Image (tube, rainbow, N blue to C red):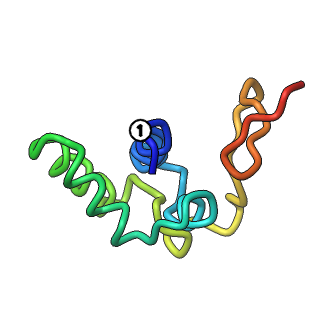
Amino acid sequence: MTEIDKDRVIEMAWEDRTPFEAIKVQFGLAEVDVIKLMRKELKETSFKLWRKRVNSGVSKKHLHKRCNEISRFKSARQRTISNNKISKR
């Protein structure tokens, strides 16, 4: 995995609305693998904060925790991303 890929996985893991399943589709990393990566790459305090947030009711990192009305999240200014490649407009 390249440094750019690691950075993107970490960024996606911090985002509340990006589920682990999306990371699995784009990078092939299961939740356990993401946790291992985060533990390795983050400082201990940052990792603990992240785990606390993921396991709280705030984060929707697991699809089963989401309400059925949220099918996806995309900002109006976000570029189209397909398999982690940004499409040109």
Q: Quadrant of residue 89?
A: top right
> Which residue extends farthest right?
89
Above/below status of 75 relative to 37: above
Q: Residues within 10 Å of mark 1 (few under 14, many from 20)?
A: few
**Furthest residue in direction left, as rendered:** 44
Secondary structure of the residue carrying numbered label 1: helix
Q: Residue at x 45, y 51 (%)?
A: 1
**Residue 6 location, x and y as percent?**
42, 45
Say left or right for 35 vs 12.
left
Residue 77 locus on image (x, y percent): 74, 24
- Percent of width and height locating residue 73: 67, 46
Q: Is residue 81 left or right of residue 7?
A: right
Task: State the count of labels.
Answer: 1
Asked if residue 72 lies left or right of residue 7, the reply is right
Which of the 4 image quadrants contains residue 21? Answer: bottom right
Up/down of 59 relative to 41, above or below = below
Q: Whole-percent x and y of residue 41? A: 24, 45
Going by the image, does 33 lie left or right of 18? left
Q: Residue at x 68, y 58 (%)?
A: 70
Please name the amino acid that badge 1 sits on.
Glu
Which residue is located at x 20 percent, y 52 percent?
40
- Residue on which disc 1 sits: 3
Which residue is at the front of the view, 12 or 57?
12
In front: 27, or 81?
27
Of all residues shown, which one is farthest toward the bottom?
64
